[in-house]
């Protein structure tokens, strides 16, 4: 009885989300202009990669703003100039590992940055650093669901999974080795939402990477691993996602991260709630 | 009765102290806000101290608390939630085992901290009732709730993963962390194994340091 009620409630939520999508989409031009450098992302629904038994298949996504490009080295220089404790020489080892900003030749070197890497995405930044940058901008990191929702779009449609040719190209990107230095911003794909460079050159931090479990929450773990986690849910991969290898790779990648990690091909962009 | 009265007087006093501390903390945040970057203050704590966190938590007695106020004692800290039926009660009982196994002379130097994954449901009143139900000594145990974003930040610092599941509970790492007097992580007890030898040894060493 109560299950039926809950299902009905969820359906209502879903319906509302869809109605909102239908209402918001055509009005895009009329919606309050997004902050500079950001795009308005219309509400919708997202199919989680993993679902718990008995869980709803779809997660509603509220509308939000997302940075068009990943945060660049030049932008990050401005951040550490305003916030010296995020300089390479001063950062707490609790908040970033020893490789933090190692691709910069000196602690803060705007000229060097300006000539060679200014307009490339900043990498070698920890989750704590990325989060602090976004806060400084009065923004936040996007959630996994938000990031994946936007990343699902091809150049022409919000759900690129409908397009086998796009899926094939996407897969090809993910099988190529990552470039040693991320390419200039804007050199990658521009998707349906007007968001650039989500695929192909590097990984991006999300606010809740900690929710990706690599071990413990899955069946078949050794006992010693299993009791490190509390969770009774058995995970199953949703049917629609069986072909989505790139999403699997991202999930696996996130599950391997720690908040202090800094990596040569891991950067970030910021999101923002609607006013 | 008299002890009770004395204790409540003490509680009021501690409350005032904490309130004072809170206004100071807020003033700092406001100041930082005006200059455009709500950042941590200059290093009053060691570079590896988790007491650098600016987050303001709420105790089971509804007092604001910054983690830095835990400084000076060795702290044994875990993240749990009160409606958890499987692992969390085990974690708490492991911590009680640690408390019981500590030599008496160490007791005044060791505190126990539980931080909830579920601040929406684990209000101070709920945490207070939980503390009473579990028989936790309020003089040595702190039960904290805080804004979800601060919970996420602390969990990340402690290397703890968690995720809300369909039933409204949480899937989470089981970790008991030992912090030295400066708030640096000196030991992590991972999983639910009963052998507390290395954890007790870490606490003993941290008290002596």
Image: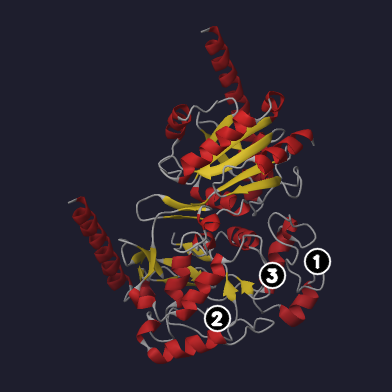
Residue at disc 3, secondary structure = loop
The answer to whether marks 1 and 2 sit on the same chain is yes
* Subunit of label 2: A
Here the colouring is secondary structure
Task: Say which of marks 1 and 3 sits in front.
Answer: 3
Of mark 1 and mark 2, the one earlier in the sequence is: 1
Considering only vertical position in the picture, is A164 above or below B36? below
Q: Are marks 3 and 2 in contact (CB under 8 Å)?
A: no
The answer to whether marks 1 and 3 sit on the same chain is yes
Residue denoted by label 1 = A107
Label 1 Cα crowd, 10 Å radius (few <14 / some 14-19 / many 20+): some
Residue denoted by label 3 = A124
* Subunit of label 1: A
The alpha-carbon separation of the residues under discs 3 and 2 comes to: 18 Å
Q: Quadrant of the C terminus of chain A?
A: bottom left
* Subunit of label 3: A
For this view, does B99 lie left or right of residue A118? Answer: left
Task: Say which of marks 3 and 2 sits in front.
Answer: 3
Q: Residue at x 49, y 41 (%)?
A: B90
Q: Is residue A89 visible?
A: yes
Residue at disc 1, secondary structure = loop
Q: Residue at x 58, y 66 (%)?
A: A256
Most foreground residue, A127 or A81: A127
* Residue at the bottom extreme, as displayed: A165
Q: Percent position (x, y) of residue B129?
A: 43, 29
Q: Percent position (x, y) of residue A246?
A: 49, 79
Q: Percent position (x, y) of residue B146?
A: 51, 42
Residue at disc 2, secondary structure = loop
Mark carried by residue A197: 2
Displayed quadrant of residue A125: bottom right
């Amino acid at each position: 009885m109560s299950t039926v009620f809950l299902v009905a409630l969820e359906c209502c939520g879903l319906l509302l989300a869809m109605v909102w999508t239908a209402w918001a989409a055509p009005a895009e031009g009329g919606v309050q202009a997004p902050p500079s450098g950001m795009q308005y992302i219309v509400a919708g629904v997202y199919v989680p990669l993993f679902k718990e038994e008995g869980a709803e298949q779809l997660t509603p996504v509220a509308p939000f703003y997302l940075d068009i490009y990943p945060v660049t080295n030049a932008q990050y220089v401005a951040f550490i100039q305003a916030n010296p404790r995020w300089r390479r020489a001063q950062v707490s080892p609790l908040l970033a590992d020893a490789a933090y900003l190692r691709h910069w030749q000196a602690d803060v070197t705007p000229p060097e940055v300006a000539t060679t890497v200014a307009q490339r995405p900043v990498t070698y930044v920890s989750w704590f650093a990325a989060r602090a940058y976004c806060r400084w901008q009065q923004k936040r990191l996007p959630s996994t669901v938000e990031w994946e929702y936007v990343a699902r779009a091809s150049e022409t449609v919000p759900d690129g999974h409908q397009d086998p040719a796009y899926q094939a190209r996407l897969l090809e990107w993910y099988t190529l080795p990552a470039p040693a230095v991320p390419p200039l911003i804007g050199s990658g794909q521009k998707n349906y939402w007007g968001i650039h460079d989500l695929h192909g050159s590097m990984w991006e931090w999300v606010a809740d990477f900690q929710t990706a479990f690599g071990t413990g929450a899955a069946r078949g773990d050794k006992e010693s691993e299993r009791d490190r986690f509390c969770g009774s849910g058995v995970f199953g991969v949703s049917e629609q996602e069986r072909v989505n290898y790139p999403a699997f790779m991202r999930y696996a990648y996130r599950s391997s991260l720690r908040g202090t990690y800094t990596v040569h091909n891991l950067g970030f962009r910021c999101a923002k709630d609607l006013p | 009765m008299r002890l009770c009265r004395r204790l409540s007087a003490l509680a009021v006093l501690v409350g005032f102290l904490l309130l004072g501390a809170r206004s100071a903390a807020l003033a700092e945040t406001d100041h930082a806000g005006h200059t455009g970057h709500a950042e941590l203050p200059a290093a009053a704590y060691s570079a590896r101290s988790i007491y650098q966190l600016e987050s303001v938590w709420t105790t089971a007695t509804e007092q604001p608390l910054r983690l830095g106020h835990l400084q000076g004692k060795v702290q044994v800290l875990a993240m749990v939630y009160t409606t958890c039926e499987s692992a969390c009660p085990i974690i708490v009982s492991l911590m009680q085992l640690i408390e019981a196994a500590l030599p008496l002379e160490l007791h005044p130097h060791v505190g126990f901290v539980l931080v909830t994954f579920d601040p929406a449901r684990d209000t101070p009143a709920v945490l207070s009732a939980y503390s009473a139900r579990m028989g936790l000594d309020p003089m040595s145990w702190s039960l904290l709730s805080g804004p979800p974003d601060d919970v996420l930040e602390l969990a990340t610092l402690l290397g703890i993963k968690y995720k809300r599941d369909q039933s409204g509970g949480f899937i989470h790492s089981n970790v008991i962390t030992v912090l030295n007097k400066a708030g640096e992580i000196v030991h992590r007890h991972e999983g639910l194994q009963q052998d507390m030898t290395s954890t007790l040894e870490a606490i003993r060493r941290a008290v002596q340091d």
